[in-house]
Image (cartoon, grey):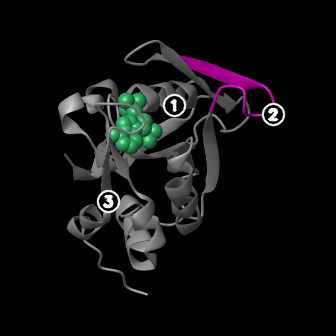
Amino acid sequence: MPNSVTPAEIEAAIRNVPDFPKPGIQFKDITPVLANARLFAGAIELLTKNFQPGSVDAVVGIDARGFIFAAAAAIKLHAGFVPVRKKGKLPYQTHEQDYALEYGHATVAMHIDALKPGARVLLIDDLLATGGTSAAATALVQKLGATIVEAGFLIELKFLNGREKLVGFPVRSLIAY
Ligand code: AMP
């Protein structure tokens, strides 16, 4: 089914929630995009448009909203799906990567056998803010000897310069604020 959704249509469906989860943060709520079959499918089309089925080995998604887009993209690209999770959630042996938050730090993890050396990886998350989360995910992918061929985001908060932390591969976002 051809699906010619534009980024502007997706942007119109994103709900801005002020002061969530804490004062001063404007949360970009993507659930209205997910709830709309056409927009959800269109978002996946746009996030995968540089790749043919079979041209990537895995789509890595970041906990938790990134899983939704990455899993759908993996099916479309005939690729596996690999989760990067918050520390303590994955059951088997993991590599972990710390990264700085505005106050304090956080840790993400990936199973030690999640990717084969040389695997071609599309990295996906819903939103690029400071880039700390996706830079940590990148480090985990690279630790396993896999290669990120592109990082894709539904939304980019440009004023936070997150893409400066993502070097060596193209970074694409559908909607920038
Ligand atoms: P960062 O590590 O600063 O790039 O933050 C990116 C992660 O935090 C992503 O997984 C997003 O889902 C989440 N995030 C950060 N800021 C926002 C925001 N304003 N609205 C929704 N999610 C956000």
Label 1 or label 2, whichever comes before in sequence order: 2
Q: Give the residue at x 41% y 65%.
A: 32
| Residue 151 image point, x, y percent | 39, 43
Q: Give the residue at x 58% y 51%.
A: 57
Identity, as a three-letter code, of the amino acid under mark 3: Ile
* Residue reaching furthest to the top: 104
Instruction: Kindly identify which residue carries mark 2.
Output: 91
Cα distance in 3D space between marks 3 and 2: 34 Å
| Residue 159 image point, x, y percent | 18, 33
| Number of numbered tags placed on the structure image | 3
Q: Are marks 1 and 2 in contact (CB under 8 Å)?
A: no
Q: Quadrant of ligand 1?
A: top left
Which of discs 3 and 2 lies nearer the camera? The answer is 3
| Residue 94 is inside the magenta segment | yes
* Residue reaching furthest to the bottom: 1
Instruction: Kindly identify which residue carries mark 3.
Output: 14
The secondary structure type at the circle numbered 1 is helix
| Residue 71 image point, x, y percent | 58, 57
Identity, as a three-letter code, of the amino acid under mark 1: Ala
Disc number for residue 137: 1
Start-end of magenta stretch: 86-98
* Label 1: how many Cα within 10 Å (few below 14, some 14–19, many 20+): many
The secondary structure type at the circle numbered 2 is loop
Q: Nearer the viewer, residue 173 or 160?
A: 160
Identity, as a three-letter code, of the amino acid under mark 2: Pro
Q: Nearer the viewer, residue 165 or 10?
A: 10
Quarter of the view holding residue 97 = top right
**Which quadrant, please, contains the C terminus?**
top left
Q: Is residue 59 above or below residue 41?
A: above
